[in-house]
Amino acid sequence: MTTTINLLPWREERRKQQQQEFIAMLVLAALVGGLLFWLWQGHVNQQIADQRARNSHIEARSSELDEKIKEIKELKSRRDELVARMQVIQSLQGNRPAIVYVFDRLVKTLPDGVFYNEIKRSGSLYTISGVAESNNRISRLMRNLEESEWFHEANLLNVTALAEEDGGGGDANSFTLTVKQVSSNSNEEEEKQ
């Protein structure tokens, strides 16, 4: 049997082979790492794009809701204006019969020998100008107004004696007085009872 001795530098070849395997493994690891990074970056970019799409959808819906809210506010203000108008109309409709009662009471409180020339109204205050045959008749008118359930606080502003040429004869006097109307709602409640 013969023995053969290998004198070739087998260790160097083995080192070269191991070095080539190591470089191949590094290249393979770099390729796998690059592939994983590319996949991860694509996934992250897709999530960012999806989130941006959701954000733009939310912003679009939010602007639509803002428009609807603005429209609702306009409708509410219109409704409030209409309700206010309806309340004014209802109060006017409710007070319509009151003026009839006021004039009826003014006539019923008028004693003989007293005549109205002018009646002015400012809110609930009536200013009455007229002519009376005597001061006693003016006093009686004021008592009648105070006793009426429609009026209170009769206040005589002035009394002037009429001259013969102004149509006055004897004790005729021109007068001006004010009287306040009592709330028509309380009077209507009293009349219902």
Image (spheres, grey):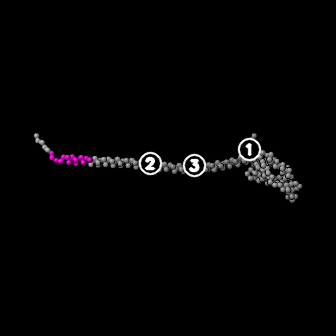
- The kind of secondary structure the magenta stretch mainly shows is helix
The percent coordinates of residue 106 (x first, y second) are 79, 49
Which residue position is annotated with label 2?
Answer: 51
Mark linked to residue 87: none
Picture residue at 76% right of the left edge, 48% below the top? 181
The span picked out in magenta is: 6-22
Instruction: Answer with left or right where residue 106 lies relative to residue 84.
Output: right
What kind of residue is marked 2?
Gln
Which residue position is annotated with label 3?
Answer: 72
Outermost residue on the left side: it is: 1
The answer to if 13 sits in the magenta stretch is yes
Which residue position is annotated with label 1?
Answer: 186
Picture residue at 34% right of the left edge, 47% below the top? 36
Picture residue at 78% right of the left edge, 48% below the top? 152
For label 2, the crowd category at 10 Å Cα-Cα, with few meaning under 14, some 14 to 19 and many 20 or more, is few
Question: Which of the image's four quarters has the C terminus?
Answer: top right
For the question of whether residue 72 can be seen, the reply is yes
What kind of residue is marked 3?
Ile
Is label 1 in a helix, a strand or a loop?
Answer: helix
For the question of whether residue 103 can be seen, the reply is no
Is label 2 in a helix, a strand or a loop?
Answer: helix
The percent coordinates of residue 18 (x first, y second) are 24, 46
Q: Earlier in the sequence, mark 3 or mark 1?
A: 3
* Separation (CA) of disc 3 from disc 2: 31 Å
Picture residue at 13% right of the left edge, 43% below the top? 4
Q: Earlier in the sequence, mark 3 or mark 2?
A: 2
